[in-house]
Image (cartoon, helix red, strand yellow):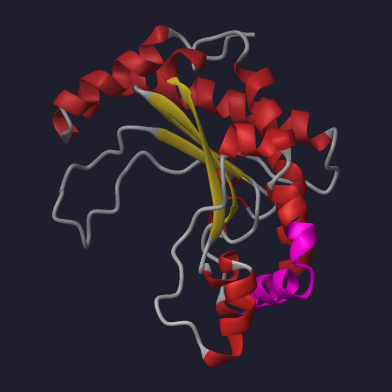
Amino acid sequence: MQYFTKDFIGFFKELAKNNNKDWFHQNKKRYETSVKEPFTYFVDALITKIQKYDSDLKIEPKDCILRIHRDIRFSKDKSPYNLHYTAFVSKAGKKDKSIPGIFIRCAPDMIGIMGGCFGPTKEQLLKIRTSIRNDPKEFKRLIENKDFVQRFGEIRGEAMKRIPKEWKEACEKEPLIAHKQFYFVGEEGSSLITSTTLMNEMMKYWKAMQPVNEYLTKVIQ
């Protein structure tokens, strides 16, 4: 099934050249028709697909989709609108990005697919580090899975610059323990957005990331 027309990409390409409120309001109906409505329908369909494998996922598109408006309060760039459309499909949705799920960003030049823990709390981070230290082989087995590596490569995130004494030995054995974030990113070309295979590809990414997401979810809870 095709969820988006070529104008999804066209809208954002034009917005990049006209990132101002006047242009946006002149094209608001186009935004609703080509971007917001089909993206909401797509996310709703994605949630339904995932629920076949995870019945505990009880969430609606409005809880997942981020606003197109940028937060410019502390930014030098005062452009009012994002040049992409995004959704975080997890049990907590967009309100808590520490809960693992599938984060999808559709832009004119690519689709980004992210999973894992992007912003874990101190307590959650301690639990993740402790779990990996206690059984590093289990975590390694998951992130070295062929399908995971093919789609996401490796675990990403900032790492501690100064490693506390109590963690030095563990970090020497497994450097990932020094991470302050545990997320991973895949990428596809923007032509997939208007393709009839979009949903199938997103579900392949979801299935590839799910074992790692399940591990992190279990650990932080």
Using residue 18 as the reference point, say whether residue 183 is left or right of it: right
Q: x, y (%) of residue 27?
A: 26, 20
Residue located at (53% from left, 72% from top): 178
Front-most of 75 and 65?
75
Query: Against 27, is 162 above or below?
Result: below
Whether 40 is among the magenta residues is no
Q: Which residues are magenta?
A: 123-139
* Image quadrant containing the C terminus: bottom right
Using residue 108 as the reference point, say whether residue 63 is left or right of it: right
Q: Quadrant of residue 197?
A: top right
Q: x, y (%) of residue 74?
A: 21, 62
Residue at the bottom extreme of this rendering? 165
- Magenta highlight: main SS: helix
Q: Is residue 58 visible?
A: yes
Q: Is residue 125 visible?
A: no
Residue located at (37% from left, 11% from top): 7
Query: Against 198, is 66 above or below?
Result: below
Q: Quadrant of residue 8?
A: top left
Residue located at (76% from left, 34% from top): 50
Count of numbered labels shown in the rendering: 0
Front-most of 171 and 23?
171
